[in-house]
Every structure is written in C-alpha cells, then in structure tokens.
Image: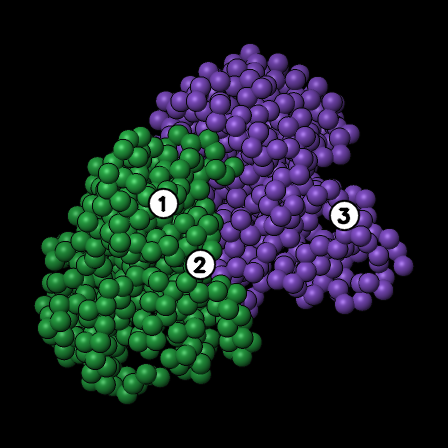
Chain colours: A purple, B green
Amino acid sequence: MEKADYIIRGDYVLPMDEGHTVIKDGAVVVRGKSIIDVCEGKDISKKYSSKNIIGGENRAVLPGLINTHTHAAMVYFRGMADDLPLKEWLEKHIWPAESKWLSPEFVSDATELACLEMLKAGITTYSDMYFFEDASGRAAKKIGMRAVLGAGIVDFPTISGKNADEYLGKAEKFIEKWKKDELITPCIAPHSIYACGPETLTKVKKIAGKYNVPIHIHVSEARWEVEEIEKKYDKRPVEHLENLGFLDGCMVAAHCVWVNEKEIEALAKHKVGVSHCIESNLKLGSGIAPVPAMLRAGIMVAFGTDGAASNNDLNILSEMSTAAKVHKTVSGDPTALDAKTALLMATRWGAEVLGLGEITGSLEKGKAADIIIMNLDRPHLTPLYDIYSHIVYSSMASDVETVFVNGKFVVDNRKLCSVDEGEIISKARAWSRKIR
Amino acid sequence: MEKADYIIRGDYVLPMDEGHTVIKDGAVVVRGKSIIDVCEGKDISKKYSSKNIIGGENRAVLPGLINTHTHAAMVYFRGMADDLPLKEWLEKHIWPAESKWLSPEFVSDATELACLEMLKAGITTYSDMYFFEDASGRAAKKIGMRAVLGAGIVDFPTISGKNADEYLGKAEKFIEKWKKDELITPCIAPHSIYACGPETLTKVKKIAGKYNVPIHIHVSEARWEVEEIEKKYDKRPVEHLENLGFLDGCMVAAHCVWVNEKEIEALAKHKVGVSHCIESNLKLGSGIAPVPAMLRAGIMVAFGTDGAASNNDLNILSEMSTAAKVHKTVSGDPTALDAKTALLMATRWGAEVLGLGEITGSLEKGKAADIIIMNLDRPHLTPLYDIYSHIVYSSMASDVETVFVNGKFVVDNRKLCSVDEGEIISKARAWSRKIR
C-alpha cells in the first residue's frame, strides 16, 4: 500500500492524451508536487492510502487549463473603454492610463487579481507579456500560479525603459533571476514586428538561444500590421520573421489573424505555436484567425484570453466555446474545431506551445499536479451524454470547484487558499477609484 | 409611509429605459405582483417601509432577461450530438430521439429543468415552440416562470398530430385554455415556411387575428431554406410571407440569418420582431444574421437561445456577449452592437418583440415585478468602471443571485424556491439513462 498526499476522484477523469481517453470513475494520485498515478477508481483503496480523498460523484477531473497569451495586469482596466475602434481605444484610453498609472506596485496588485480570476476559472498556467514582469512574477508566486513571463521589448521609450538595448538588458537580468524558479518560466517578449526592427529581433533571438527560453510575440493581429510590414520590408510578417531566422525554437505567436497559406506553411514547418485569442479579436473587430487551416497544416494552436481590457474576462472555458462555435460558421463546416480538439488546445497543446509539455497540460504519471475538479451537479450540465461537449459548450468558470498547482491546493471549493480574496478585491477597488 | 412587500436595493439599478439610465444606489419597490416605484435609495426609508429589504452593496438590479426563442424541452438532448452537419444532426440524432421519447411527461419534466436553468441565468420570460405545450405550460407555472408558448404547426404527421388541421385545432384549444393565464401567454407557432404551405399559414394568421395572440415562426435560418422557397414560390421567404399578408400583427421571426436588404425593409415596415440566436446559428454553421443592418433599419431585434441541443445552454448573458463581439468583427466596426444596445435587446426589446412590452422587460412603475439581482462582488467583475460593460462582457449566469417573477421570489441566493432542484435533476438523469 503506497502513501499518497491526495487521491482525486471523479466520475470522469480526462487525462487529455491524444486519444481522448475518458476514465469513468477514475482517480488521480498525487504525491508531493507530482502525479504518481492516473487510473480507474474502483481498486484505488487497495493500492494507495491517503488522508485526503477529494472529488468524487458528479465531478470531472482534468488538467489545469492553459492561457497562452495575456497581459494579466491589464485586468485593472477591464471595462474602462469598450465598443471603440482599436486606435481610439489604445490612444485615448489604454495608453494614457498605462503611462499615468503603471508601476511595479500596480502590476503586482493587478496580477494578483488576474491570477485569482484565472485560477477560479480553472487556469493553472498563463503566459504574460507586459511591463514590470518582476512584480508580476512575485504576485503569481504569492498566489501560487504557474506562469511564463516576458517583459515587452520595443524600439521606443515607454514607462519601463528608453530604448531597445535597455529593455534587452533588463530582459536578460529578468531571465537570469527567474531561470531556476519552479513556477515561473522567464521568456523574452518582443512586442511585435512593427514595434521591433530587424536589429532588435536579431538580438532577441540571440538571448533566447543563449538562455534557451521561449519567445512570445504578437503576430498579425490586425490587417494594418500586414500592410505596414509589407510596405517596409516587401514581405508579409511571417515571411519577414522567417527571413530573419526568427521562427526556430520555442515561440508563441499570438493572434496570427492575418496569415495566408504560405505563412501557415512556414509556421507549421518551423513548429511555431499559435495563441488564438478569438474573443479579443472579435471584440476589437480585428478579424478571425484561420484556425481550421492552421490545424490542418499541423500547427499547434492553443487559446489565449489576451488582456481583460479587450475581452473582458480571463476565461479559457469561454474562449473554447466561442472558438468552437465561430469557426464552424466561418468555415461553413459544422464539424470544424470539435469539442475534443478544443479541450486539447486548452490543455496539452497549450502547455506544449509554451515549452512546458514535459511539465503540465495533461494528467500523466510524473507530470506536475496541475489539476482541476469541475462540479457537474448543475442544471446547465444536466443531463450528461458527452463530457467533452459539456465542458466546452455548457460549462461556466463557476463550475470549477477545486484547483491544484504543482501539488498544492490553491482553490478549495471556490475559495483561494493562499491570499484573502477580499483583500485582493479591495486593493483593486482602491486603484480603480484613483484611475477613474 | 407606504407599505411595500419588497424593497430591492442596488449600487446600480438599471431600469432599461431607452435613455440607458443608471440609478446609482437605487431601489425598486414591489407590492403584490407589481413594481410601485423605481427611485434613488437614499431617502427610501422615509417613503416606504418593508420587512424585506434585499440586495444592496455590490449588487446590480435589473429587469429579468427575455429569451425570445427556444425549444425548452430539448434540454434533455443537450450534448447528445454535436459537431455535426445540421442534416445529420437532425435526421440521425434529434428526430429519432424525439419520435422515440416525446410525451407530455417528457415535456413537462424537461421543461422544469429548462426553467430552472433559465431562472438561474436571470431569464424570467421565455418564448417556446415545441410539442405538448400544455405540459410545458403546467411546468413553467409550477416553477414560476413567465412564458409565451406555442405548439409547432406543420403540414406533415409527427408525434403530436396527423396533419395541419389537427395541429390548428389543438392550437385553438390551447389558446382558449391559457388565454387568461397570468404567467402563460399562448401564441400560435407555425414551424416555418418550408414546413407550412400557404394554406396553413393563412389559417394560422386567421387564428392569430381571432384571438389576438402572437405568431412565432422560424424564418431563413439556413441558406437552403431560401433556395427551396425561391424555387417553390419564386420569392424570397420574407417576400413570400409579406405576399400572404402574414407580417402584420405581433410576430416573432426566429433567426433571420439569410435576409437581404429588401427583406430587412419589409420586416421593418411591418414591425416584425426578430429573435437573434447567434450561438445556435454559429454552432450549427448556419451563418450570421445581419443584425447591425436590421438595427439600422429600425427592426426590434432581441435574443434567443434556441434549444439547448444546439447551443448548448439557455443563457442570454452569454448570447449578449457573443453577439456583441461577433458583430463587431463581421461588420468590421468595433462600435457595432455596443453593450447598452445588447442589454436593451435582452430586456425591454425582448418583451416588446413578444407583445409583453406593457407587462415586463423594464423596471417601471406599474409593470410586473420581474426583477433580477446580480452579485458584483466577484474577481471577474472587478474593478468596475461601466456597469453595462460588465453585465454584457464579463458577467456569468452564476452571478445572478436573486430572481423575482411577477412579484414572487423564485430564486433566492441561487436556490430555486418553488421546487426541489435535486428532484428536477434526478428526473433528468433518469430520463437520460433511458435515452442513452
């Protein structure tokens, strides 16, 4: 009889392997930070003993969801300006607010709120690009969330630096500082091709190679970007990146709304991971990424919420639902992006896109115990014929009951364990009274 | 000092008038079945006394949401078949299941579950088209929900009748039986133009006129309908209806995905209400209705969930969010379908489309007390700059805390008051074990 820290039971355990296995009446066994077994539940008591047996009837157990693209601290600007054209939204609302308010303290407080929201929506790992990422890393660790963090690099002065070399220097220091952390993976995050010239991108690539960290970049979110890049470099954005030798290694390309067939081929060839941010793209009127074509080409596509200022929530369950529905109509094919594929994108593929495929994204022996329990005992999840369908099309973030990150209870029956939720919310309200 | 049954307080009271008024620290006063006042909260205790003062800090108070098109009892087929082309979905899954299982008992039990789900999502009124609507009416009344119900009329035999005349006869009886009910409004519901020939539609129109009840019909949901009707009648669907004199009076046209400019003009001219079912349309790959053009033409557009078998939930909050986002990208205009318009469509306009504009859909003195309280004290609703934005883009059904229908407490702190929720869910599971 082996001792375990937790035995997590569920009517449905979804390991999220490529075969879409469903273990009915299953169990996930956790010791320390790791999953030590994923198996049927009926004989579990003969094999493992634990004081903590949780989950059970009317519960689904699955790997934590992965948010591959966000600007977590922007949660403090949620709903500040909506229903506006991108340019007006940015120039009249977001940028002035950022340049007035951003500071390490702002980022730290706001990231706590974002982590709280994400964890309660079943997200255990997120990938961030923003300012003052050191503060962000401290907040994520304090809350107990896994994160891939990269400070934005641009060619012009902002609140956090004067020029590319300053940002690059800070990025190297940031990587060195966090490189060995268990929960935080540093990455390097050039903002975009239009904000970073070839020289900066080449330096970024060098640093990524030197430290073996992922690159996180915006690619072709809006149509004007493509036009601007074509005018400047006589190449489409992905071709430009390919030409610079930028596409190899672990890279997360966020958005990829305006990519043509040739660019899709190049992304597939170089194994670039794409972060699909459907709700933000729809809300800003940016367009709809050709996800079914990317999937056919073999690109690993995952989901991202983008910042809460343009979404307006940090909820991968609803990204899945929206994406699976929208792509059916846009492609004219109701079989496009089915529920099983959507959930794979939100879990296993999300982790692989971030270079964390060995660590998280599925329930497998040896992986970190990043696990969520969903409560299926709800009117809107009744009756139940197909667990994948229910998670993707019918569930809500509030159905996430319990969340483990790295073997630690971080949400217990919808309550954050690490920090008082009321405090996080009070701080947010205090900031918003100033910002308003 | 006047006595009141309930004083409902909220940091934000949204009466849902056309001026988008927000009463900060407001109150809604209820006596019996009606709203007797909507006012600022600060002096309320000088004017009214009540033992029941509810809501308050961090709460938004708004009229109950209106679901203008559903097939409530199909909730028992939720997730039974997904990610399939419409024809295969209908012919291989839905129709066989319906012909095997439908009965008054099925419809009554399933409608209870649908009402439970809808009420907990803040929907206080729904408009239904299905079979055995008498059973549906009894269930809705038992749960305590307002409904507009119409038994489907077609030209061919189904589980509930042999031919059009039998359906029409039953429809008249149904109308006579329920005509004076306080919560249930009977309507007449010819399924569609392709399922009802001109003779049947003419008879439907006569009955609607005789009893002064609304007509509820599917119009141009899928592209093949338009082609079929054009081939048969040499007219597009809306022109065909106009030609039959069918468009005057209170009429709910569900879907209207494939309507051209001329048809939009005709719908506007005859004041036909449109039920926009964006999530079902997207999921079945049917297309995207030209809602911004309809709104510009002055058509009153409201939201419908359609049945849960093709959605897969009964949630108007998420319909609002999806529609407001999708239309921005489809129209290429990020100002299209803003949050205020979306919430108007989900409340006041929904009631008007159903012919219930005098009774419900807004918080006004003299209207029925159909009221919901939303809890804003949630991470995903923090911070708060714009209450409309939060309700449309960030809230979840689970934020609906309390629901009144016709002056009665039907959901109290997320618990149904009229019937034991566990019983409703148990019945659903028992049915699904048979159906599976």
Residue B199, picture quadrant: bottom left
Give the structural element (helix, strand or loop) at label 2: strand
Question: Which residue position holds label 2?
Answer: B416
Identify the residue under disc 1: B51
For the residue marked with disc 2, what is the amino acid? Leu
Percent across and percent down for residue A207 are 69, 24
Mark on residue A367? Answer: 3
Quadrant housing the C terminus of chain B: bottom right
Q: Give, as a three-letter code, the residue at label 1.
A: Lys
Front-most of B331 and A193? B331
Left or right of A78, for residue B42: left
Q: Residue at x 67, y 35 (%)?
A: A418
Label 2: chain letter: B
Q: Residue furthest right?
A: A1
Vertical order, A37 against B379 (above or below): below
Quadrant assignment for the N terminus of chain B: top left
- Tell which residue pokes out farthest to the bottom in this image: B162
Are the residues flagged by discs 3 and 1 in contact, CB closer than 8 Å? no
